[in-house]
């Protein structure tokens, strides 16, 4: 890992936390690259995430995700968003040590509003509210474990969150 390829920050959090949306706005504000491991995975697989889940299953998606996280951490010098489930893998959590990791936190009510019917998120296509609650309960400690900063996003606009983060990352030491 070289200084030149270190992400400005890595965004983690539940589906609907706003990792992709806030990450894009933050990267634009900072004038740096935006990278999203979900996009990298889709490019590599040559198909959308829901199709990966249907054709090869979640375990294969997680294999692709571990490879995508390692590659992105080694080559991204901008803002990096991970998929909500990336923290499940011990390998990914270990790889995040030493990086500035921002947990965009969201409570169930706002997350449900934001993901709607779960279109594009294969884990949420059946009963999004109950599934999200389960995922969030399971993952909360893992987001807390990897995060160096937590930003509460409930009731806030993405631009507002991105502006706060821009100030934070511009004014802080590496982690
Ligand atoms: N702070 C926010 N307030 C309201 N809607 C949001 C906020 N952040 C994201 N959204 C919306 O919620 C949906 C999911 O956001 P997304 O960035 O894809 O989340 P994630 O990548 O964390 O799953 C999108 O429709 C997005 O426009
Ligand atoms: O929570 C998860 O396990 C997943 C979250 C998704 O990303 P977002 O968190 O950006 O929705 C995507 O990686 C995939 O559908 C699995
Ligand atoms: Mg996303």
Image (cartoon, rainbow, N blue to C red):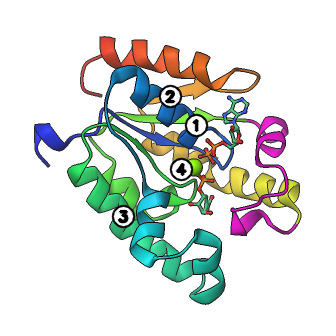
Residue placed under numbered mark 4 in the picture: 142
Q: Look at the numbered disc 2 and give the secondary structure of its residue.
A: helix
Q: Image point 63% across, 34% down: which residue?
A: 105
Earlier in the chain: of badge 4 and badge 3, it is 3
Earlier in the chain: of badge 1 and badge 4, it is 1
Determine crowd level at label 1: few under 14, some 14-19, many 20+ residues with C-alpha closer than 10 A.
some
x, y percent for residue 20: 54, 42
Cα distance between the residues tagged 1 and 4: 22 Å
Determine crowd level at label 2: few under 14, some 14-19, many 20+ residues with C-alpha closer than 10 A.
many
Q: Assess mark 4: CB under 8 A from ligand 2? A: no
Q: Which residues are magenta?
A: 107-126
- Disc tally is 4
| Image height of 125 relative to 139, above or below | below
Q: Nearer the viewer, mark 3 or mark 1?
A: 1
Q: Residues at badges 1 and 4 in contact (C-beta under 8 Å)?
A: no
Magenta residue check for 125 = yes
Query: Horizontal placement of 14 versus 37: left or right?
Result: right
Residue placed under numbered mark 2 in the picture: 25
Query: Horizontal placement of 99 versus 88: left or right?
Result: left
Residue placed under numbered mark 1 in the picture: 21
Q: Image point 59% across, 20% down: which residue?
A: 159
Cα distance between the residues tagged 2 and 3: 22 Å
Q: Residues at badges 1 and 2 in contact (C-beta under 8 Å)?
A: yes
């Amino acid at each position: 890992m070289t200084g030149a390829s270190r992400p400005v920050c890595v965004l983690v959090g539940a589906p609907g936390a706003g990792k992709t949306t806030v990450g894009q706005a933050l990267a634009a504000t900072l004038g740096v690259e935006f990278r999203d491991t979900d996009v990298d995975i889709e490019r590599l697989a040559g198909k959308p995430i829901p199709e990966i889940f249907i054709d090869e299953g979640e375990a294969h998606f997680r294999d692709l995700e571990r490879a995508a996280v390692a590659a992105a951490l080694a080559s991204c010098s901008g803002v990096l968003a991970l998929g909500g489930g990336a923290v499940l893998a011990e390998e990914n959590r270990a790889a995040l040590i030493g990086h500035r990791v921002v947990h965009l936190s969201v409570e169930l009510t706002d997350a449900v509003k934001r993901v709607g019917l779960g279109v594009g998120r294969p884990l949420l296509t059946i009963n999004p509210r109950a599934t999200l609650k389960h995922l969030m309960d399971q993952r909360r400690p893992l987001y807390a474990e990897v995060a160096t900063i937590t930003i509460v996003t409930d009731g806030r606009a993405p631009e507002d969150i991105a502006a706060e983060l821009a100030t934070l990352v511009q004014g802080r030491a590496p982690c």
